[in-house]
Amino acid sequence: MALIRWSDQRDLFRPFEEMEREMERLRREMDRLFSGFRGFRPFRVGVFPLLNVSEDKDNLYVRAELPGIDPKDIEISVEGDTLTLRGERKSPEVGENVSYHRREREFGRFRRSLTLPTRIDADKVEAVFKNGILQITLPKAEEVRPKQITVKTA
């Protein structure tokens, strides 16, 4: 019988921790190397748009943060078990000879796909855009909704 002490198990993770530190060092070095190229960003942080997905017994709900986007520039499609959001965040008009000190908001076209956890009734999907938040209500397909079964007595 082998006994493994907790201190021995910590050693098992040491190579992964070292690898993670080395990857972070490499990322910082790449950022430093490419910092001289205007407009080139080798590593993008985050995903756009940010999504929250929730459900109740009848529906799935997807909420997407889309500030500064015109609802006419948003396309929503459902194909099989995949929901796709496409659109474009247009760059605001700025005067000539403008120099940015910091530019973190990205502009341009985006596409975000999400695999849905259950089948839905695509004909009844609704979308509402209010205050920069897109809420999509996806009714679950009838066959996957819970059924209440009545117990009969003899």
Image (cartoon, rainbow, N blue to C red):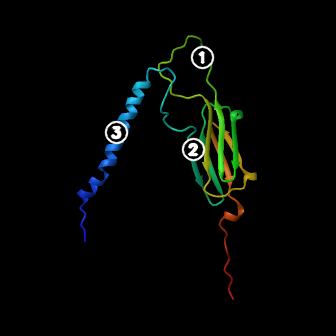
x 70%, y 39%: residue: 75
Q: Secondary structure at mark 2?
A: strand
x 76%, y 52%: residue: 123
Q: Are marks 2 and 1 in contact (CB under 8 Å)?
A: no
The image shows residue 19, relative to residue 6, as above or below, that is above
Tell me residue 77's x, y (percent). Answer: 70, 45
- Say which amino acid is labelled 1: Val
Tell me residue 41's x, y (percent). Answer: 49, 28
Q: Disc 1 marks which residue?
A: 94
The image shows residue 67, relative to residue 152, as above or below, that is above
Q: Secondary structure at mark 1?
A: loop
Q: Disc 3 marks which residue?
A: 22
Q: Are marks 3 and 2 in contact (CB under 8 Å)?
A: no
- Distance from the alpha carbon under mark 3 to that under mark 2: 31 Å
* Crowd class of label 1 (few under 14; some 14 to 19; many from 20; radius 10 Å): few
- Say which amino acid is labelled 3: Glu
Q: Disc 2 marks which residue?
A: 51
> As rendered, which of 126 and 79 lies closer to the eye?
79
